[in-house]
Image (cartoon, rainbow, N blue to C red):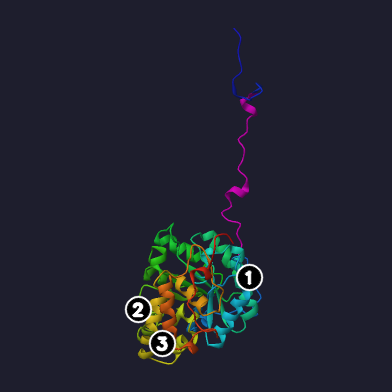
């Protein structure tokens, strides 16, 4: 009787291999190394800003990004806006935030604008780049690039839309905090998720946490200031009381794009309910539609930027434009940016750009 050898497998060509010749492949070492990521940082300390320097800022403007008719950045208009902020006492700017429409920029545009701002104005004002993202990978990459081009601090939001757990929030922020001075931005109306105080208190153990831009309200601000955590009000309509009644360091402001000198007075000159009341109608008008629609419309009416909108933003309707003209007259044209007379623009004056 014939005997047969056993084989473990047959290849596609029909050649059999003895079991003894089979060797299980070993995994490559790269597959089991947890991470090859090394921080992209410079040891050069010239022009670096400490976390304590950021903590002291009282007026930070969330600066507007103006456009050319084809939708590209209008850097000449941007530079004029920056110079106006510096001349009127703003101490810092947020570049590419919600107000600056960072959400409509490519990362190339975003980092370029941060670098341009640092290069032209970084010796006169603190440049805080909005390099946050709902993707931790993107937040890390953008923040590395932002600090590499010289920004003084980063603004980071919690992951939005694709929300994470509370432990996920800590891991997300821990991934970027070590890179440099950081402001965490809590705005549940936009993200759909509140960052609770115990998460901020955990993150405050990092020496890089400068503070929080808080939009929940003044009671939340007091929770932080009572525990020694620096807070900026993220609500223009509440910033006066936050500063003088609840311990906020200052404000990260939208309305200071329009009246920077008056907002500086509101933050530096002591309790001033009369000035605050004078500004509230303007602030209410500014946020009648989601920011930055009102601001974009107002700056165009003041003649300091071209009336160009990147979609999906569109200008306020003509009735609101008429209201703005009256608000400027009531407050005083001299307090607003620019030198041209305020005017009611026609619908046909505006340019809406779909592709840019």
Q: Are marks 1 and 3 in contact (CB under 8 Å)?
A: no
**Left or right relative to 269: residue 153:** right
Q: Which type of secondary structure does the marked residue at label 2 adopt? A: helix
Let me know if residue 189 appears in the view. yes
The residue carrying mark 2 is: 218
Q: Which type of secondary structure does the marked residue at label 1 adopt? A: helix
Q: Which type of secondary structure does the marked residue at label 3 adopt? A: helix
- Between disc 2 and disc 1, the foreground one is 2
The residue carrying mark 1 is: 148
Residue 75 position, x and y percent, is 62, 74
Establish if 124 lies above or below 313: below
- Between disc 1 and disc 3, the foreground one is 3
> Is residue 27 covered in magenta?
yes
- Between disc 3 and disc 2, the foreground one is 3
Sequence-first disc among 1 and 3: 1
For the N terminus, the quadrant is top right
**Left or right relative to 47: residue 88:** left
The residue carrying mark 3 is: 330
Residue 23 position, x and y percent, is 63, 33
For the C terminus, the quadrant is bottom right
Establish if 128 lies above or below 188: below
Task: Tell me where the magenta segment starts and ends, as one range.
Answer: 17-39
Q: Nearer the viewer, residue 130 or 327?
A: 327
Sequence-first disc among 2 and 1: 1
């Amino acid at each position: 009787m014939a005997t047969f050898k056993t084989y473990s497998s047959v290849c596609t060509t029909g050649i059999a291999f003895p079991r003894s010749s089979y060797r299980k492949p070993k995994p490559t070492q790269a597959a089991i190394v947890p991470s090859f990521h090394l921080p992209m940082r410079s040891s050069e300390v010239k022009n670096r800003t400490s976390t304590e320097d950021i903590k002291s800022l009282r007026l930070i403007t969330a600066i507007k990004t103006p456009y050319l008719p084809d939708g590209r950045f209008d850097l000449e208009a941007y530079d004029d806006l920056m110079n106006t902020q510096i001349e009127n006492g703003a101490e810092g700017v947020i570049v590419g935030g919600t107000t600056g429409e960072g959400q409509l920029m490519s990362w190339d545009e975003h980092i370029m604008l941060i670098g341009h701002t640092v290069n032209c104005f970084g010796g006169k004002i603190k440049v805080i780049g909005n390099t946050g993202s709902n993707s931790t990978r993107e937040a890390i990459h953008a923040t590395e690039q932002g600090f590499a081009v010289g920004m003084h601090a980063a603004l980071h939001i919690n992951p939005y839309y694709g929300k994470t757990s509370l432990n996920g929030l800590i891991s997300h922020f821990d991934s970027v905090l070590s890179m440099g001075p950081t402001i965490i931005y809590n705005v549940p109306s936009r993200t759909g998720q509140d960052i609770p105080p115990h998460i901020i208190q955990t993150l405050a153990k990092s020496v890089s946490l400068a503070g929080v831009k808080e939009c929940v309200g003044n009671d939340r601000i007091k929770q932080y200031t009572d525990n020694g955590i620096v807070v900026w009000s993220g609500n223009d309509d509440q910033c006066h009381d936050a500063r003088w009644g609840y311990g906020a360091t200052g404000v990260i402001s939208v309305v200071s794009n329009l009246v920077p000198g008056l907002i500086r007075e509101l933050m530096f000159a002591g309790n001033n309910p009369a000035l605050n009341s004078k500004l509230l109608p303007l602030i209410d008008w500014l946020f009648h539609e989601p920011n930055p629609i009102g601001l974009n419309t107002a700056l165009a009416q003041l003649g300091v930027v071209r009336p160009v909108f990147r979609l999906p933003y569109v200008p306020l309707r003509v009735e609101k434009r008429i209201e703005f003209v009256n608000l400027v007259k009531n407050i005083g044209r001299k307090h607003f940016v620019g030198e041209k007379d305020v005017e009611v623009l026609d619908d046909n004056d505006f340019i809406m750009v779909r592709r840019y």
